[in-house]
Amino acid sequence: MPRTLITGGAGFLGSHLCDRFIAEGHEVVCMDNLITGSTDNIAHLAGHERFRFVHHDVSQYIFLEGPVDNVLHFASPASPIDYLELPIQTLKVGSLGTHNCLGLAKAKGARFLIASTSEVYGDPLIHPQPETYWGNVNPVGLRGVYDEAKRFAEAMTMAYHRYHGLDTRILRIFNTYGPRMRLDDGRALPAFMGQALRGEPITVFGDGSQTRSFQYVDDLVEGIWRLLHSGEHEPVNIGNPDEVSILEFAQEVVALTGSDSEIVHKELPADDPKIRQPDITRARAVLDWEPRVDRAEGLRRTLEYFREQVRA
């Protein structure tokens, strides 16, 4: 029976990964310090014979008895509101946490997969963004604590691959949404849905012309599964190329929820990327992967979850 460690496993993405790996017959060790994750996301797995939760900060030394076949490092604050409030923790989990997870993978002879991000491209000067693009990042800006932590994590991962021969994967995640997102995490979808469902004004930063490419969480999980079981060591973008402006996205949420909320504009945050769209040529070629859930369907699937969260 394969045994897989998922750090950040009580978070939005990590908990969906726990579900997938349990469904695939793995024994799953979910490790999380719960600063942004929640046991609510994994409560349905409590008592499962192949699931174990470990409350631990991976920025500290990791000890895990027994064999480990895969290490998936997803621990990190991942929304602007979180990593701006937790800048040191974000840098530490990307550096010390990545080093500790790589060390564990090396000691156990496990495959290692790092959850990186489209934020490594910064405010891109190339559009769409291929994996060969080195990015346009402000290392001392407010967002640098997240961007540079992930860039360092990628560099450390490749160093372990080249120097120690570790079997590694680098996943660059583009904007992802779905059930188990926190209403207060500051990202566009939960903010818009929460405001719309409560009848509050919907806040769009700037004029809303900045673009994003949103993928449904099930598509991301499938991409992760395929990447882990591929032989690809170079970074791979996993995202939906269907690009939309933030203003159009807000309007879609208003229409879907049937809300009377008005859209209001606030000042654009510093270093906010103006465009974001993945080039998924490599994912298509290497993983035979592309997104299957369109935005309209994904938003419908997500709406009921947020309705329950607003009522709670």
Image (cartoon, rainbow, N blue to C red):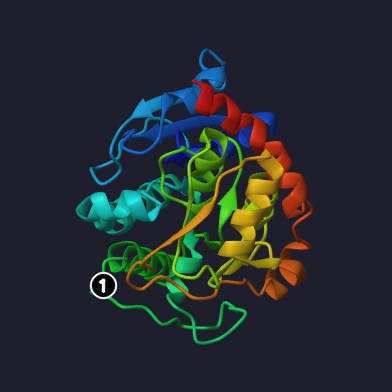
Residue 210 relative to residue 77: left or right: right
Q: Position of residue 9 (x, y in %)?
A: 46, 36
Q: Mark 1 — residue?
A: 141
Residue 300 relative to residue 80: left or right: right
Looking at the image, is 164 positioned above or below residue 297? below
Among all residues in the image, which is located at the extreme top?
Answer: 47
Residue 306 relative to residue 95: left or right: right
The amino acid type, in three-letter code, at marker 1 is Gly
Q: Position of residue 56 (x, y in %)?
A: 30, 33
In the depicted view, which residue is nearer to us: 50 or 180? 180
Q: Residue at x 51, y 28 (%)?
A: 310
The quarter in which the N terminus is drawn is top right
Density class for disc 1 (Cα within 10 Å; few <14, some 14-19, many ≥20) is: few
In the depicted view, which residue is nearer to us: 176 or 64? 176
Q: Would residue 25 be visible to someone looking at this image? A: no
In the depicted view, which residue is nearer to us: 61 or 236? 236
Quick one: SS at disc 1? Answer: loop
Q: Position of residue 262 (x, y in %)?
A: 54, 50
